Image: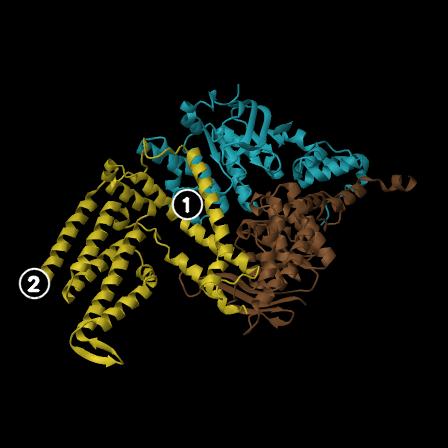
Chain colours: A brown, B cyan, C yellow
Amino acid sequence: MAIKVENLTFIYNQGTALEQKALDDVSFEIPDGQFVGLIGHTGSGKSTLIQHLNGLVKPTGGKILYNGEDICGEGYNLRQLRSKVGLVFQYPEHQLFEVDVISDVCYGPRNLGLSEEEVHARAEDALRLVGMKEKYWDQSPFELSGGQKRRVAIAGVLAMNPEVLILDEPTAGLDPRGRDEILDQIEMLHKERGMTTILVSHSMEDMARYADRLLVMNHGKKAFDGTPKEVFRHYKELEQMGLAAPQVTYVVHALRERGLEIDEDITTVEEARDALLAVLRRPGKDQHA
Amino acid sequence: MGIIKAEKLIFDYIRRDEEENIEEVDRAIDDLSVDVEKGSFVAILGHNGSGKSTLAKHINAILVPTEGTVWVSDMDTADESKLWEIRKRAGMVFQNPDNQIIGNVVEEDVGFGPENIGVPTDDIWKRVDESLEAVGMTAYRYKSPNKLSGGQKQRVAIAGVMAMRPECIVLDEPTAMLDPNGRKEVIRTVRELNQKEGITVLLITHYMEEVIHADRVIVMDEGKIVMDGNPREIFSRVEELKGYRLDVPQVTELAYELRRAGADLPEGILSREEFVESFIEAVSKTAPEKLHAPMP
Amino acid sequence: MLCWRYCADLERINMLREITIGQYYPVDSVLHRMDPRTKLFGTMVYIVSLFLADNVWGYAAAAVFLAVVIRLSRVPVSFMVRGLKAILFLLLISVSFNLFLTDGEELFRIWVLRVTKEGVRMAGFMAVRLIFLVMGSSVMTLTTTPNQLTDGLEKSLGFLKKIKVPVHEMAMIMSIALRFIPILVEETDKIMKAQMARGADFESGGLVQKAKSMVPLLVPLFISAFRRATDLAMAMEARCYHGGEGRTKMKPLRYAGRDYAAYLTYAAYMGVMAAVRVVF
């Protein structure tokens, strides 16, 4: 049990006229090695939630346990936590500041007080992991393309050797191929390193493809928690929350309403293709063939 | 000749060193010709760096051609005496909603353009009222832009352009920084302006769902137009699109995959409803016994 | 070791957001509808009057005037009080200076510090003066949109154009700054969080260390500000902005009956303040 959140509540501007409940009694547990998708419309509390996991915001009520230890406890080392639970923010422009790519990635590990050799070894390792070729290492991070900037930003966090990687909309503003490349890279990291991954995204299609589990936030509360298939079964409720299911899920439901026998838990194009092809084939004909 | 026309357009970004010597030339647009019909809704697709934003900036005369010519309503954009007239006719909406709102109150921002072109006060108010109504933001007119959602900010930006009474609006990735609801909100607004007010729309995007209602889709790559046709034609060429780092909506991809596996479905399916109808038809031909009463 | 107390950084940023001047309170009132020039002039008159007051009666008159104005503005008093938070430190300093450093009849003594009767009186007046000054000016900022305010300044200072002062440009710069301050404050908050997630520590160490630790915050902030400036310039040009020449106004400034009434009130008020000073 890597992360455990118990009755987490957070109130912005407590005691003022602008008081606002951002998180309301949220509880869940994320075991090691899971790929969790976090969804919710803008203002549903998902950004506040991930900042709590990284110790950037102090809870108004409730507890957050990391490997069994209360991160809000007296004397808990937050810097240690931030190196273990890596958080990559949405816009790489908010963190890139160094003259070249490699120095920028060195910033995180250097803050951990490691030796200069170790810092460089980790930075190089992290850059390789995100697929940044060596020819870019001495370039200014500001001259890179959007997708490359994002890779460097992710590397900047990976270089701290986190056990958990949290990514806030890592694909915003990228073109379709750029989106796929970043997500594939994240999936590879998850698989090869067994890293617990929490991905915030608005794309239900991506969630269906990559996540083992979905957490749905609505008005500061946890609305759904389950596998993508379980969650997307509630597509009507999701819509009321300003969310949706993947397009193919709607197609499958519409076809079921027209009388076709198809598994309702289809969430990806591949699954839909196989299921629909099975429908098109005559059972009798196929047996002879 | 259409409302916007480019002929043999070339644009180079030139980087110079301290002594003004040319250091690097980056050709963003490479011998591009296009003609856009008045009142049409044209979507321009292309990956980041394909030259689509550079093209957009030519229509508003923010950039002028290195070679070739661009005309907006028969006015050459390189003709400096026509500059303000061109910018009045062809409005522009940019990607970052925060970086294009000048006013501290919604209605004051919408009035900014008319103020600049010297519209009399009473007329400015009329235009502001109409523009806010057209984008459905009247209820927010006294608000601070900072209190609005991304989608609402973009609608304010569109109203700001509408207040100039343009013939054409160029939107340069207006939805790239928005969430799905904000994206729908903006696209709905733009479609309405096109249909009700007859405004020519040039929508630059890389969200495929946003272009299925366009009259015409243009795909750019390396500063050139590589595909040009209606959405159905374009989306039936799935492999080609993927080659240009683009994508297709999930239903289109599903239909394409099924066709490849031999299913009898039409090319270039764009919507869910369309897919469902064609698939039911295909089933009724090959396996009618599978179509029974709706499942509970 | 980095512990919870460092979250104070983030709280400070939130403070900054609150302090940001130009917090318009959108209700409809006589004051809201008043010409910004009238309000600007009124604020100046009020400030001058506060320095004119030298006895209890003078301050009483100023208090009555302020109370009536706040009442007319229909802005909750709590909003005015909030502005005071920003000057709390200044207030404490000036009060203690006046309290301990004024010569006169000694009341009591704490260690080497003498507190005099005159000191108490001066400190009290100073505090009231500062509080009234801040509240008085927040009435103006709360009832006037920043744009109206800059319009008012532009028009009031219009005569400076004759000596080649770029009044329009300065007003435009002010107006844009007002719009972008909250955005940049928000952005600072995000950048700080992003760097803290990479183990940044903006608190520990000496002055040099602290200054160095600001680099990862300031570089992204400046780059973003430049980017926003370029974008905004392009957006303004695209909307035909080309300086103040030939520009019309959506909300041109025109004096109405209420403005003349206000100027008469100012005159009466100043008369009272002067009379109080002479008589008492």
Quick check: B211 left or right of C227? right
Indicate the secondary structure of the residue bearing disc 2: helix
Picture residue at 34% right of the left edge, 61% below the top: C86
Residue picked out by circle 1: B140
Give the quadrant of residue B103: top left
- Both marks 1 and 2 on one chain: no
Specify the label residue C279 is tagged with.
Answer: 2
Question: Furthest residue to the top?
Answer: B1
Distance CA(mark 1)–CA(mark 2):
53 Å
Picture residue at 77% right of the left edge, 33% below the top: B264
Q: As displayed, is residue A243 above or below residue B205? A: below
Position in image of residue A87 (x %, y %):
59, 58
Q: As displayed, is residue A134 above or below residue A4? A: above
Position in image of residue B136 (x %, y %):
45, 40
Quick check: A1 left or right of C144? right
Position in image of residue C24 (x %, y %):
34, 51
Select label 1 or label 2 by which is in front: 2
The residue closer to the viewer here, C101 or B16, is B16
The residue closer to the viewer here, C6 or B112, is C6
The residue closer to the viewer here, B195 or B13, is B13
Q: Check disc 1 and give the amino acid type.
A: Tyr
The residue closer to the viewer here, B97 or C96, is C96
Question: Furthest residue to the front?
Answer: B19
Q: As displayed, is residue A212 above or below residue A5? A: above
Q: What chain does mark 1 sit on?
A: B
Q: Is residue A197 visible?
A: no
Q: What chain does mark 2 sit on?
A: C
Picture residue at 37% right of the left edge, 55% below the top: C20
The number of numbered badges drawn on the structure is: 2
Specify the label residue C174 is tagged with.
Answer: none
Indicate the secondary structure of the residue bearing disc 1: helix
Quick check: B234 left or right of A20? right
